[in-house]
Amino acid sequence: MPLLETPFARLDLIRQPEQQNEPLQAFDAADEYLLHHLAEQQPDPDMRVLVLNDSFGALAASLAGKVQVTSSGDSFLAFQGLEKNLIRNGQAFDAVPSVPASEAFSGPFDRVLIRVPKTLALLEEQLIRLQGQLAPGAQVIAGAMIKHLPRAAGDLLECYIGPVQASLAVKKARLLIATAEAKAPATSPYPTRYRLDAPAIELLNHANVFCREGLDIGTRAFLPHLPKNLGTARVADLGCGNGVLAIASALQNPEAHYTLVDESFMAVQSAAENWHAALGDREVIVRAGDGLAGQETQSLDVVLCNPPFHQQQVVGDFLAWRMFQQAREALVVGGALYIVGNRHLGYHSKLARLFRGVEQVAATPKFVILKARK
């Protein structure tokens, strides 16, 4: 893999989660552009820089030790990538303070470098949170590959930060440079909320939660077919989002024990708040993580999963396949993984390679609900 070479550092970087013969690199031209732009401003070691949505630590690891840098974002895997890439390049794993998107960052910052996220609601929430966190004369510089840079990103910067200047394109990347000016205080439109009829619950959704305006159609297809009569089973909701699958299951299985895990900090925050609203003080484990990577082997009886088919802008079934493998490791012999998936993704044949029995529980014109027994 090529090295990331900028005026700040020469780095060997890896993506997360790691896979053999990784076809993609851990940085792109937008990362390079952001770092070269900052270098042209000749920052001193006392400059306070906030990095938002750094994919795998390319920005923060480059700046570590050169400026006072803090990293914030909504991806557990991105933070894991930053730690591993710091170590990989001869620095301490904690050389850069990391602030999950579910927590507030603390300024004032002289510069803010942003990788424009796929979800513009996350960008909007982050820009609102910058109120009162910018030093006099601060700049907010957002970068992206042009094909992933919607016009609305510039509109949000203009609305919440100040006048925006778009850079020239370099290697198919572009920067949006906003100069901070006094703004009237803005109230965040997040979290959003919506209600379900069955089960009768209200769900809260922080800015980066998948389908935060309403239940996605895959989950809607899955809900009527969740396993019943689980007794005291140990159940995991893998990739839990706002927690709806686990909460609906828990309402039907009052003695079962639940673990909810997602790689999005805002999803985990939403799931914890929704669980408490629906189930009070009922015991639960809700955590951000790399799927079930940290789960003890043969410690679960049931895994529920609506697997993702993309990581950031990259579409593919690598993450879903990895989740299926993790579920198999974590399940006891005789335990079961229940998933919903688009028919065309062919999950049945993939699961049959890992599990001893795969059956179709239900189907709609677009989705299938499958049960795979270990």
Image: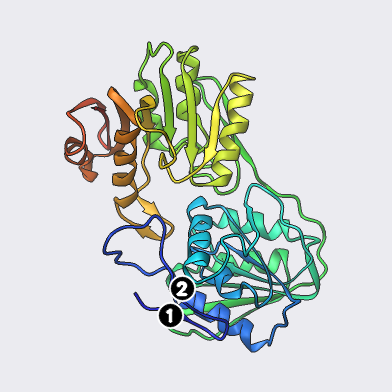
Q: How is the image coloured?
A: rainbow
| In the image: residue 154, left or right of residue 344 | right
**Dot 1 amino acid type:** Lys
Q: Residue at x 68, y 75 (%)?
A: 67
The answer to which image quadrant residue 268 occupies is top right
Kindly indicate the quadrant of the structure image that contains residue 115: bottom right
For disc 1, the marked residue is 172
In the image, is residue 52 above or below residue 343? below
Kindly indicate whether the residue at mark 1 contacts the one at mark 2 (C-beta within 8 angstroms): yes
Identify residue for label 2: 145
**Mark closer to the chain start, 2 or 1:** 2
Q: Is 199 or 267 nearer to us in this picture? A: 267
Image coordinates of residue 141 in percent, x first then y, are: 63, 74
Placement of 344 over or under 176, stated as above or below: above
Which picture quadrant has residue 97?
A: bottom right
Percent x, y of residue 312: 44, 58
Is the residue marked by circle 1 packed among few (<14), some (14-19), or many (20+) residues within 10 Å? few
Give the side of residue 136 with respect to residue 12, left or right. Answer: right
Q: Quadrant of the N terminus?
A: bottom left
Between 84 and 158, which is closer to the camera in this rendering? Answer: 84
How far across and how far down the image is residue 146, in percent? 46, 74
Q: CA distance from mark 2 to mark 1?
A: 6 Å
- Point 43% across, 31% down: residue: 237
Residue at position x 79%, y 72% from top?
181
